[in-house]
Image (tube, rainbow, N blue to C red):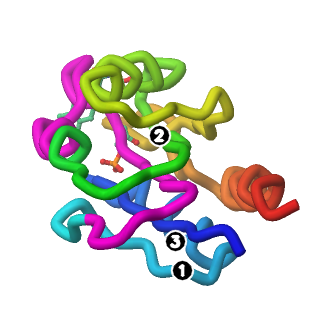
Amino acid sequence: MMKFAIRFHSKSGNTRLLADAISEVLDVPAYDISHRLTEDVDVLFFGSGVYGCALDPGVVSFISDIDVKVGEFVNFCTTGMMTSNYDLIRDVLSTTGIALSDREFHCPGSFVGLNEGRPNENDIADVKIFVNDFLD
Ligand SMILES: Cc1cc2nc3c(=O)[nH]c(=O)nc-3n(C[C@H](O)[C@H](O)[C@H](O)COP(=O)(O)O)c2cc1C
């Protein structure tokens, strides 16, 4: 059986909605980044946003400090304008030995009048479909 974990950082709750949906599909808890990984996992689903064109420093620390074996890192994110934070995540991960999946999930997240109501019901349905593919 594949072992999964979910971690996320969410300032305003947008990415947390995706994390909670992923948690429902995988039936594993979605914890924020104050919870270090304590055991090896096959797949880590990791979610965050982008703030001032950058990752939150806590996200960078969490990833840099991973000291268990992660088979594959799957990125999910919500952003205001950027299409994804994938490249920023890839840069941080490149300082570790952890492999970044080329599959990722992104949807817009509400932000000062932009993307109102996102993630919405369709986004939640889409992220569940995305995660289901990892179970096949
Ligand atoms: C202080 C701040 C700065 C932000 N800067 C950016 C940015 O540079 N580019 C972008 O695409 N989105 C930006 N956003 C939008 C967030 O990435 C977006 O709202 C995201 O969904 C937040 O996720 P969260 O609610 O999980 O923290 C910013 C949001 C905040 C609050």
Specify whether residue 89 is painted magenta.
Answer: no
Residue 58 sits in quarter: top left
Residue 103 in sight from this viewpoint:
yes
Q: Mark 1 points at which residue?
A: 28
Asked if the beta carbon under badge 3 is closer than 8 A to the nearest atom of ligand 1, the reply is: no
The amino acid type of the residue labelled 1 equals Val
CB within 8 Å, label 1 to label 3: no
What label does residue 78 carry, if any? 2
- Answer with the quadrant where ligand 1 appears in the image: top left
* Residue 18 horizontal/vertical position (percent): 54, 59
In the rendered structure, the answer to whether residue 123 lies left or right of residue 55 reads: right
* Residue 4 horizontal/vertical position (percent): 56, 67
Q: Which residue is found at the position 60% from the left and 66% from the top?
A: 22
Cα distance in 3D space between marks 3 and 2: 14 Å
Specify whether residue 51 is painted magenta.
Answer: yes
Observer-side mark, 1 or 3, equals 1
The one nearer the camera, 121 or 44, is 44
The one nearer the camera, 43 or 118, is 43
Q: Magenta part of the protein: which range?
A: 37-61
Q: Mark 3 points at which residue?
A: 20
